[in-house]
Image (cartoon, grey):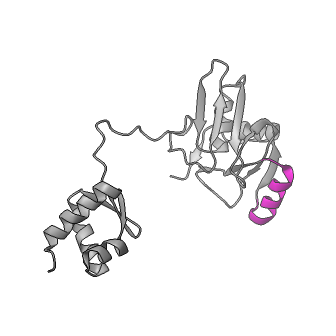
Amino acid sequence: MALSPSARQQQILTWLQENHTLSVQLLAERLQVSQMTIHRDLARLAQGGQVRKVYGGAVLASPLPETPPPASPRCAMCHQPIPGRATVTIQLLNGDSLQACCPHCGLMLLHNYPDAASILARDFLYGRMVNARQAFFVIGSDVQLCCIPSTLCFASQTDAQKFQRGFGGQVLAFTAVMAHLAAHHRQPHTSQ
């Protein structure tokens, strides 16, 4: 005898409390219904906030947090959200640190803190943090992540030059890029 939709949904919730995650295929087999029927049941449960649909199945919905999640970090220079792709961290002598959304903002911010203990920038190709004072930068390339002119960090001059050949721009070492930004770009210019 086939279960009613509400009985199926209650059974799905019971199984999810035991297993936390179940696939559509497994639920269809256990309940002896089509996968489409399971999708409809999960949609109804998700609409009621009881489950969360995931690729190929469902998980029991987590209760809402009592406190709101922390705000996403903002760039200390242009106040835009900080994506992971081109972040810069400036460590100050007093132990505080500043985050920037991209090397453009990070280097502009460094003008206000010339005695910073360190400045780390994410290598655009490999994603690892590198000492920005030893890095090379491509400024003004065709690849623009956020601020204009685009300023991207590379751990090696060779990588920066290869990137430049494909996407244009100018390759500059740390002191040269600092001088260029100071002379031409007093404030960040965002594309947003």
Image height of 11 relative to 64, above or below? below
Residue nearest the viewer, comparing 1 with 101: 1
The N terminus sits in image quarter: bottom left
From where the camera sits, is residue 71 visible?
yes
Q: Residue at 57%, 36% (x, y): give it.
A: 77
Q: Report if residue 46 is visible in the image.
A: no
At x 31%, y 55%, the residue is: 18
Rendered position, 32 above or below 47: below
Query: 61 or 166, which lies in front?
Result: 61
Tell me which secondary structure the magenta stretch mostly adopts.
Answer: helix
Q: Is residue 147 above or below residue 99?
A: below
Residue 165: x percent and y percent? 81, 63
Q: What percent of the width, then of the height, locates residue 79?
A: 50, 39
- Residue 17, percent from left and from top: 28, 55
Is residue 165 rendered magenta in the image? yes
Describe residue 37's horizontal placement relative to residue 87 as left or right.
left
Drawn side of residue 79 relative to residue 94, left or right: left
Magenta highlight range: 155-168
For the point 80% across and 54% down, the residue is: 160
Looking at the image, residue 106 lies above or below residue 117 = below
Q: Nearer the viewer, residue 35 or 70?
A: 35
Residue 7: quadrant of the picture: bottom left
Image position, residue 110 (x, y; %): 68, 31
Q: Quadrant of residue 8?
A: bottom left
Task: Single out the residue that lies furthest toward the right.
Answer: 158
Q: Residue furthest front?
A: 1
Residue in the picture at 35% in, 57% down = 19
In the displayed structure image, the side of residue 187 where residue 80 appears, left or right: left
Quarter assignment of residue 109: top right
